[in-house]
Amino acid sequence: MTYLRAIPMVGQPCLSCHGTGIDPAVTARIAKLYPKDKATGFMPGELRGAMLVRWDAASIADGK
């Protein structure tokens, strides 16, 4: 089975780190901790990505 869910940009607190007007101190911390991060510049309502989960339904039914 597969479950797919969109990750929309809904507003605060998400915009604090992923939006367009990020505090310079937060920007510096993101750059230090995640130097290859590209998850900024989003506006409310935009799609940030998706979460995909796959599992074997038979294994769950069998309790494995």
Image: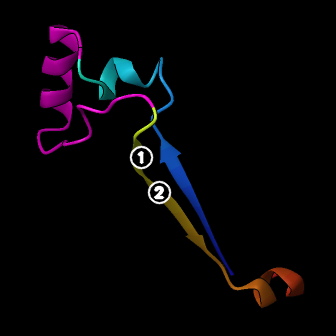
Residue 35, magenta (yes or no): yes
Residue at image location 38% in from the left, 45% down from the top: 48
Q: Secondary structure at mark 2?
A: strand
Residue 6 lies left or right of residue 1; in this view the side is left
Residue 63 lies left or right of residue 10; in this view the side is right
The residue tagged 2 is: 50
Residue bounds of the magenta highlight: 21-44
Residue at image location 31% in from the left, 29% down from the top: 18
- Where does residue 35 sit, x and y in percent of width and height? 11, 39
Nearest the viewer among 57 and 8 is 8
- Where does residue 8 sit, x and y in percent of width and height? 49, 41
Considering only vertical position in the picture, is 44 above or below 6?
above
Q: Which mark is residue 47?
A: 1
Number of other residues with Cα within 10 Å of mark 2, as a class: few under 14, some 14 to 19, many 20 or more: few
Residue at image location 30% in from the left, 33% down from the top: 42
Amino acid tagged 2? Ala
- Where does residue 26 sit, x and y in percent of width and height? 23, 15
Q: Secondary structure at mark 1?
A: strand
Q: Which mark is residue 6?
A: none
Q: Are marks 2 and 1 in contact (CB under 8 Å)?
A: yes
Total of numbered circles in the picture? 2
Considering only vertical position in the picture, is 8 above or below 25?
below
Question: Image quadrant of residue 64?
Answer: bottom right
| Closer to the eye: label 2 or 1 | 1
